[in-house]
């Protein structure tokens, strides 16, 4: 057997003997804040990544039963926009309990990340439930 073939055979034998394990994907860091458009919402909502950037009224549409961190990959969400003819109830979660925050009839609402609205792990979790204004 030639030396090159011997080395190749040895290399393949070593590789075959190695355990087959997938390298775990690194988990994304937790978001600072997110907005969840409730599964019971009637429509998607406009969501705002950063309110102080002077940009458009909203940055993206968040479909029903989606979260800004998972659906859009955002580390934060600072507000939402409700279109004409719809209203929304918003809630923040703290210590596993949902607390009512505001009822909005068409327009933009800031979802603050402060001591009141931030959970013990430092994440502000917002839930928005949209419905047709009556």
Image (cartoon, rainbow, N blue to C red):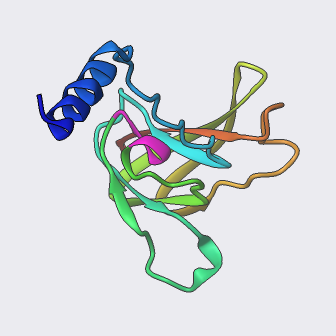
Q: Is residue 42 above or below residue 6?
A: below
Q: Is residue 133 visible?
A: no
Q: Residue at x 57, y 56 (%)?
A: 77
Q: Tally the numbered discs.
A: 0
User: Magenta stretch: residue 45 in it?
Assistant: no
Q: Quadrant of residue 1?
A: top left
Residue 30 picture location, percent across and down: 63, 40
Q: Is residue 16 visible?
A: yes
Q: Is residue 100 above or below residue 74?
A: above
Q: Nearer the viewer, residue 82 or 20?
A: 20
Q: Residue at x 44, y 51 (%)?
A: 73
User: Magenta stretch: residue 68 in it?
Assistant: yes
Q: Residue at x 57, y 59 (%)?
A: 79
What is the magenta range?
A: 65-70
Tell whether 134 sits left or right of 25.
left
Tell whether 11 sits left or right of 21.
left
Q: Is residue 109 above or below residue 27?
A: below
Q: Is residue 131 above or below residue 45?
A: above
Residue 46 picture location, percent across and down: 39, 60
Residue sitting farthest toward the right: 115
């Amino acid at each position: 057997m030639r030396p090159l073939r011997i080395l190749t055979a040895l290399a393949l034998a070593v590789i075959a003997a190695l355990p087959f394990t997938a390298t775990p994907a690194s988990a994304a860091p937790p978001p600072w804040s997110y907005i969840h458009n409730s599964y019971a919402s009637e429509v998607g909502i406009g969501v705002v990544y950063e309110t102080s950037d002077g940009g458009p009224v909203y940055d993206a549409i968040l479909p029903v039963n989606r979260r800004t961190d998972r659906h859009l990959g955002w580390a934060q969400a600072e507000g939402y926009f409700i279109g004409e003819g719809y209203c929304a109830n918003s809630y923040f979660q703290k210590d596993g309990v949902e607390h009512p925050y505001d009822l909005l009839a068409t327009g933009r609402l800031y979802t603050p990340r402060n001591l009141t609205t931030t959970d013990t792990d430092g994440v502000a979790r917002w839930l928005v439930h949209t419905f047709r204004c009556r």
